[in-house]
Image: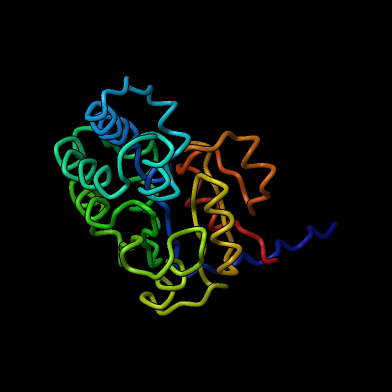
Amino acid sequence: MNQPQRRPGKTYRAVLFDFDGTLGDSYPAITASVNHVRALHGLPPLSEPEVRRHVGRGGGYLLQHTVPTGSLEANTAAYRAHHSSVLREGTRLMPGAADALRALHERGLLLGVCSNKPVDFTRELVSYLGVASYLHVVLGPEDVPHPKPAPDMLRAGLSRLRVTAEQTLYIGDMTVDIQTARAARMSVWVVPTGSDEIETLRQAHPDRLLRNLGELPELIADEPEA
């Protein structure tokens, strides 16, 4: 009896990643800096889960939703000044992230980060966490006219890597990442390790929902053609 032929796998040339909630767990550091700004206004601290749900849509969004007093400009300056002191000790790689990046890099894929996190913080962290050598580009909101969910950052990543949207996969942890990838006409997979609950992610219809990044290298190799 003839066995059915396996469909050829889709060939990706590049993979772009979000950072917070996807590659890195920076929630302790972010929470510490939010609470520092709140303390300047005499406000009580927020728990990490309370802060986490506002992470991923940019620093302005985060502070507008966690510090309801003072000017955004002053609060942003206070946050950034404090964040450098907690950035490293309050951030770790997500489980499976380093191994996934290493495997994809060794396979010859072009890798990058496109995150709404301030880009100087992201670049410091990928170096500190030992994964900068796997990445060909690291982009943040300062590098483009509009942050996610606008497609500008992903399009800039495609341009820097000299690949097309069809050749590239975006990995994130939030509905905003799904919206961004759709706007850029890219495939998008998500992990339930960030700010959005797993059911919220399902309802946003990503192309694939992973358990964690450890699944990524094998699944990319087995991804069927659309």
Q: Residue at x 82, y 60 (%)?
A: 2
Count how many numbered circles sit on residues in the image. Answer: 0
Which is nearer the eye, 160 or 217?
Answer: 160
- Which quadrant of the view contains residue 203? top right
Residue 104, horizontal then vertical, whole percent: 40, 58
Which is nearer the eye, 113 or 226?
Answer: 113
Q: Residue at x 18, y 46 (%)?
A: 128
- Which quadrant of the view contains residue 145? bottom left
Which quadrant: the C terminus?
Answer: bottom right
Residue 44, horizontal then vertical, whole percent: 32, 19
Q: Locate residue 134 relative to residue 8 in the image: left or right.
A: left
Compared with 80, 147 (above or below) is below
Q: Locate residue 168 relative to residue 134 in the image: left or right.
A: right
Q: Locate residue 176 relative to residue 214 in the image: left or right.
A: right
Which is nearer the eye, 30 or 74?
Answer: 74
Which quadrant: the N terminus?
Answer: bottom right
Which is nearer the eye, 190 or 81?
Answer: 81
Residue 178, horizontal then vertical, whole percent: 58, 54
Q: Residue at x 22, y 56 (%)?
A: 120
Compared with 4, 70 (above or below) is above
Residue 176, horizontal then vertical, whole percent: 54, 51
